[in-house]
Image (cartoon, rainbow, N blue to C red):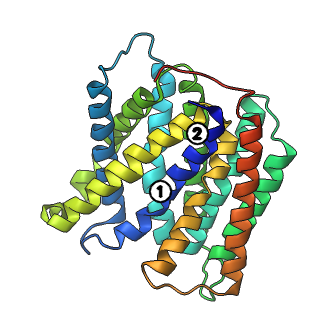
Amino acid sequence: MNGKIAPFLIVMAAVLWGTTGTAQTFAPEAAHPVAIGAARLAVGGLFLLALVFMRGGLSLKNWPIKATVLAALSMALFQPLFFSAVTVTGVAIGTVVAIGSAPVLSGFLEWIFLKRSPSRIWWASTFLSITGCLMLFLNKDSVVVDPVGVLMALGAGLSFAVYAIVSRDLVGKFPSLSIVAVVFTLSAVFLAPFLFIFDMSWMADVRGWGIVLYLGVMTTGVAYFLFGRGLTYVSSSTAVTLALAEPLTAALFGVFLLGEQLNATSWVGMALLMLGIGLMMMNSKSDGGKNEHRAAY
């Protein structure tokens, strides 16, 4: 794979993630967000495993168990932490804190553990993107900050940052499809108890199955496969910043599919998000061939 298209793969993954909220609005009313999250991981993991076996099977020789468990646990924690944060402190605060903190936390973790200092372009792009995200979501009069909800959102951001860093190392050594298949299958096992805690009768509905299949196959299986392929050529901090295309996509879908209205502040925020992501993509393309970690696909 040409390293220059890696940023586009990550943005494509983020675009798919951005459709999650819109898709969930079509789910049956009885479907709890955490239950949907657990179900989508189960479907996504099975879908990815099926692809692996269709392409020749899975080799577990010299498999890094500790790193795989850490990546799976991080992704499993992200689901309930994010959805709980949104429930406790609202969609605006929960989304901004979780998604906005992830790039900063990723850059900080890279600096601490990998001794890799983020570039000036990364700081500029991340600042523009997070500012845009703030302007996009925090423009409502009824914004309530709940400390517990904020802590949960920070936990979600940290979970995603850890997942990106650990996965970045894994896809440099093993096929990305195998990595995401094993990680998401294991994540689904971790979240399996939620399938028994919440009412899952809504899945008997055709609409319920349709939503779970879309979320599992497209926004989990395909999206994280693309994210993993992109991680092969860009740093985790860069990838997490590019992933801020997710709230941008969610906002656009809200406007054009759900009839939501955005004020001037939100549109300016959207423009800043586009600018920040575009800046990062151009910088990633120019550096795409310098630090390649190749794996067999």
Spatial distance from mark 2 to mark 1, Cα to Cα?
15 Å
Asked if one can make out residue 163 in the rendered structure from this viewpoint, the answer is yes
In the figure, residue 212 lies in which quadrant?
bottom left
Please say if 154 is above or below 120.
Answer: below
Q: Position of residue 64 (x, y in %)?
A: 48, 18
The label number, if any, that marks residue 274 in the structure image: none
Which residue does the image show at 40% across and 48% down from the upper left? 220
Please say if 110 is above or below 255.
Answer: above
Mark 2, residues whose alpha carbon is within 10 Å: few (<14), some, or many (≥20)? many
Which residue does the image show at 69% across and 86% down from the upper left? 264
Q: Identify which residue, 142 or 222, lies in the foreground.
A: 222
Which residue does the image show at 71% across and 82% down from the upper left? 265
Residue that numbered label 1 is attached to: 17
Left or right of residue 258: residue 156 = right
Marks 2/1 in contact by CB < 8 Å: the verdict is no
Residue that numbered label 2 is attached to: 164
Mark 1, residues whose alpha carbon is within 10 Å: few (<14), some, or many (≥20)? many
Q: Position of residue 196 (x, y in %)?
A: 21, 52
Q: Of the residues shown, which amino acid type is indicated by label 2?
A: Ala
Please say if 284 is above or below 23.
Answer: above
Q: Position of residue 235 (x, y in %)?
A: 68, 36
Disc 2 or 1, which lies upstream in sequence?
A: 1
Label 1: element kind: helix
Please say if 270 is above or below 153.
Answer: below
